[in-house]
Image (tube, grey):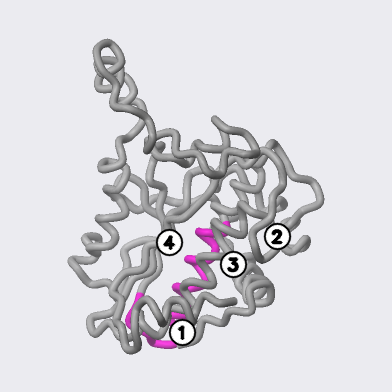
Amino acid sequence: KTLPARLDAALGGGAAIDVLLNNAGVMAVPERQSTADGFEKTVGINHLGHFALVAALMPSLQRAKSGFRVINVSSDAHRFASAGAIKEAIAAKLDPPEYAAGGWGAYGVSKAANVLFTVELQRRLEAAGVKGSAVALHPGVVQTDLSRYIIGGASGGDLHPVQDAAAPTGVGAFLKSNLLDKAILTVDKGANTQVYLAAAADTQGDRGSRSGLYFDKMKAVAPNAAAADPELAKKLWELSESLTGAKIGF
C-alpha cells in the first residue's frame, strides 16, 4: 500500500524508465507462509508484488520517449501448473487450501502467473496503442540464492547460500569450474536472456514491440498452453487488481 509513495520518493517526480525487469522471487517454501500484506508468500512475491510494481511505475514507463519494455522472469517450472491448477488457484484467490508438494505447487502457479500477466499486459498495451511491450523468460538453472528454502527449510528466508559461501580452493575449485559451472549457470551467464531482452535485441532495439511472448536461451519458445490462455490471463489480471488494489492504467 505504501509502494507508490516510496517509489516516488526514491525516483523523484517525472522519472522516465525504459525497462522494468521483474526478477524478485522465492522458490520451494516448504510450508505456507504469508507476506506482510497477508498473501501466500510464493505467489505474493513472485506475482502480486510485480503486478503492483508495474502499476506504480507505469507513468514512468510511459515517459520513455522511444517506448518501454516490461520483462517478467518466469521459469520452465510454469509447466508444473496445469490449466486446472491455475483455475483452482484463481478460484481460491491465489491461496488454495492445500499447500501442494512442499511449495512446488505454489511455485509452478506463480511462474505460470508471470506468463499470464505478460499475455494480458501485452494485449492491453496493444489495445491502448501504447508504445511498450511485455515479455517473459526462463533464465535457466542459475547459481543464485533462490535455493535458500531448499537448504534452510521453512526458516531459510534470510539465508544467502551462494552469496555467503567462501570461494572454493583446491579440489573444490576444480570441481566448481569443471562440473558445477557446466551443469548450473553462473550468474553472469544466467542473465544473458534478461540482458538480451532489456536491450530489445530481438527487435533491433525497438522496446515498443516484441518478437515473442516467452524466451529461453535468447530465443522465443512456446510456453505451455495454460500459461498462454487469454481467458485465464484476463481472470488473473482482474483478481490481481482486486487483491492488491493496484490498477495498471494507460
Residue 210 position in % (x across, y down):
32, 67
Three-letter code, disc 4: Asn
Q: Is residue 139 above or below residue 2?
A: above
Q: Nearer the viewer, residue 211 or 164?
A: 164
Residue identified by numbered label 3:
233
Which of labels 4 and 3 is toward the front?
4
Which of labels 2 and 1 is toward the front?
2
Label 4 vs 3, first from the N-terminus:
4
Q: Nearer the viewer, residue 216 or 182?
A: 182
Three-letter code, disc 2: Leu
**Among all residues in the image, which is located at the extreme right?**
97
Q: How far separated are the C-alphas under marks 2 and 4? A: 19 Å
Q: How far separated are the C-alphas under marks 4 and 1? A: 23 Å
**Among all residues in the image, which is located at the extreme top?**
171
Q: Are marks 2 and 1 in contact (CB under 8 Å)?
A: no
Badge 4 element: strand
Q: Which residues are magenta?
A: 113-132
Residue 82 position in % (x across, y down):
65, 48
Q: Is residue 80 above or below residue 55?
A: above
Three-letter code, disc 3: Ala
Label 4 vs 1, first from the N-terminus:
4
Label 3 vs 2, first from the N-terminus:
2
Label 2 vs 4, first from the N-terminus:
4
Label drawn at residue 94: 2
Three-letter code, disc 1: Ala
- Graded by Cα atoms within 10 Å as few (under 14), some (14 to 19) or many (20 or more), the crowding at tag 1 reads few
Label drawn at residue 22: 4
Q: Nearer the viewer, residue 128 or 5?
A: 5
